[in-house]
Image (tube, rainbow, N blue to C red):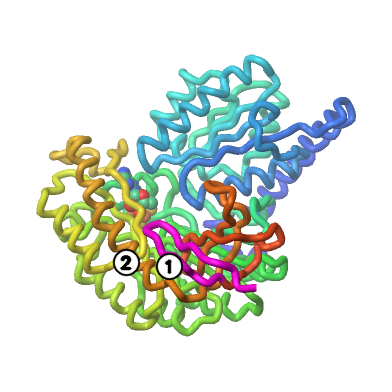
Amino acid sequence: MEESRKKSRMVSHEEMERQREYTAWIRTENERYFTENGCRPRAFVLTLGCQQNEADSEKLAGMAMAMGYEMTQTPEEARLIMVNTCAIREHAEQRALSLVGQYKHLKAKNPELVIVICGCMVVQEHRINDIKFKYPYVDILFGTSSIHRFPELLCEKLRRGRRILRSDETEYLVAEGIPVHRESGFRAWVSVMYGCNNFCSYCIVPYVRGRERSRKKEEIVAEVRKLVAEGYRDITLLGQNVNSYGKDGGEEYDFADLLSELDEIEGDYWLHFMTSHPKDASRKLIDVMASSKHIARHFHLPMQSGSDRVLKAMNRRYDFEKYIGIVDYIREKMPDAVITSDIIVGFPEETEEDFEATLNALRRAKFDMIYSFLYSPRKGTPAAQMEGQIPAEEKSRRFDRLLAVQNEISLASNKPLEGKTLRVLCDGISKNNASFYSGRCEGGKIVFFEGEPSDTGKFLNVGIERGDTFALYGTVKR
Ligand code: 5AD
Ligand code: SF4
C-alpha cells in the first residue's frame, strides 16, 4: 500500500498516525472536562472565502469532534475558536482581522479559551507578523499546508501553554484520512486536487496554497461512492483548476476520465465541479458531461475580462476567441446548460475600451450569472506592482455598469424558464425570506417555493411561474 502511494506528495501513514495519537490525548483531557463539568467543551469554526475553505473547515470541525469537542454556532460559549481565513481580496482579510479583534474580550473573560487562526491569509509573512504583534491573544497560527497537524499544534499549546505561530511548509502535500464533519446531510464537497500552478498575475492563491497536487483517483472514487450510499444528493468536486487533475502525477488519466468513472456510481445524485480554467477546458470534458447521467449541466468558466490585452496582462493564456469557442461548444452539446463566470473589474491599466470589450463579451456569452469583483491588489503578485492602478471610484462606476448589463442578461436567461418544470434540490426554509423554502436546480439557480419540513434534502419537481434576475419562483408538483 505504502509503495503505491506517491510518497513525495503524500503525508505518510506514520505522520497521520502520530496526529491520531495527539487527538486521543486531547480527547482524554476533554473527557475529564466532561466528567467535571457535565458538558463537553465546545468548538466554533468561522469560515471566510471559497468552497475549498468550507471544505477545510469541515476538516477542522471533524478533527475537533474527534478530539472530544462539541460544535457550537455561538463563539461566546466556545473553549476553542478557529478562524479559517481567506486572502483573495483585501476585504476578506480585513473581515478576518476585525472578527479576530472581536474575540479579544472573550479571551479576557475566559483565559482558557484557545483561539486559532489558519488558512490562506496567515501564510503571508506580513500577516503572520500582524498576528504575532497586534493580536497577542491568538494562541495558534498555521497555514494551509499544516491543516493535518492541527491536533499536534493544539496538543502542544494545551500541554506547554505557549503560543504557536507556524510558518507554512515549503512543501505542500496531500493528506488523506483527516476526519470530516459535514455541515449538510445532502450537499458535500470533495477536493480532487489542491494548489495552483497558473500564477494569474492578480492572484494570491499560488503563493498561499502551493503547487498543484492531485488526490489519488481511488481515494476520490471511494469518497464519492460512500457519500452517495449515505444519501448525499449533490456532490461538488473541488480544485483551483480541476482541468489540471492528474497532470502532476504524469499519468494519462485526466479530469474527464475521473468524471466518467464517478458517473458510473449508481444512485440519484448530481455531480458538480469547480473551477475550470478556460485555457485547458477540453472538448473531451464537455463530451463526457453531455453524455453523463449524473454530471450537472452547469459550467463555471471564469472569463475575468473580455479584452485580449487585459487577459494577456492577467497571464490567463487564452484570448476571447478561444474562450467563446468553449462556450459555444458547451451550448452546442448541451443547449440547456447553465454557464456562469467570474469577472474582475478595474485591473491595472484597464481602459474604457478594454472595459467595453468585457461588456460586449457579456452580451455575446450570455452567462446565466456572473460573480464580479473589484480588482484588489495583493501584496507580492505582479499585478500589484503594475503602473496604472485604477482609482476606486472608477472601479465602482465600471462595476455598476457591468452589473446593469449582466442583470438584463440574467433576467433574459430566467424568463424562458417560466412554464417549465425543474428538478430542484431543496435546502429548507429560505434564510432571506422565512415564508419561502429555497433550493437550487441542476444549473445552480436559486428557486423559491412553498415547501414542507420534510422537503429538505429532497429532489422536488417545481413548476416555474416567475423568472426574475436573481431567482426563480414556482410551485412544487406533488
Ligand atoms: N482581485 C479581485 N478579484 C480576484 N479574484 C482573484 N484574485 C482577485 C483579486 N486580486 C477573483 C477571480 C477568481 C475569483 C475566485 O476571485 O475572478 O476567479
Ligand atoms: Fe488564481 Fe488563476 Fe490559479 Fe484561479 S487559476 S487560483 S485565478 S492563479
**Of callouts 2 and 1, which one flags the residue occurring earlier in the amino acid sequence?**
1
Q: Residues within 10 Å of mark 2 (few under 14, many from 20)?
A: some
284 relative position to 107: left or right:
left
Q: Residues within 10 Å of mark 1 (few under 14, many from 20)?
A: some
- Amino acid carrying label 2: it is Ala
Q: Is residue 101 visible?
A: yes
Q: Nearer the viewer, residue 219 or 360?
A: 360
- Vertical relation: 223 (above or below) 392: below
Instruction: Evaluate whether residue 277 shows in this view.
Output: no
- Image quarter where the C terminus lies is bottom right
Marks 2/1: CA distance?
39 Å
- Residue range (magenta): 462-478
- Specify whether residue 473 is painted magenta: yes
Q: Is residue 62 left or right of residue 351?
A: right
Snapshot quadrant of residue 382: top left
Question: According to the image, label 2 marks what residue?
Answer: 412
Q: Residue at x 42, y 44 (%)?
A: 208
Q: Which residue is mark 1?
A: 247
The residue drawn where x is 73% and y is 43% is 65
Foreground mark, 2 or 1, reads 2
Residue drawn where x is 60% and y is 81% of the image: 264
Identify the image quadrant of residue 67: top right
- Residue 408 x, y percent position in the rendering: 28, 60
Image position of 65 (left or right of 432)? right
Residue 132, image x, y percentages: 49, 22
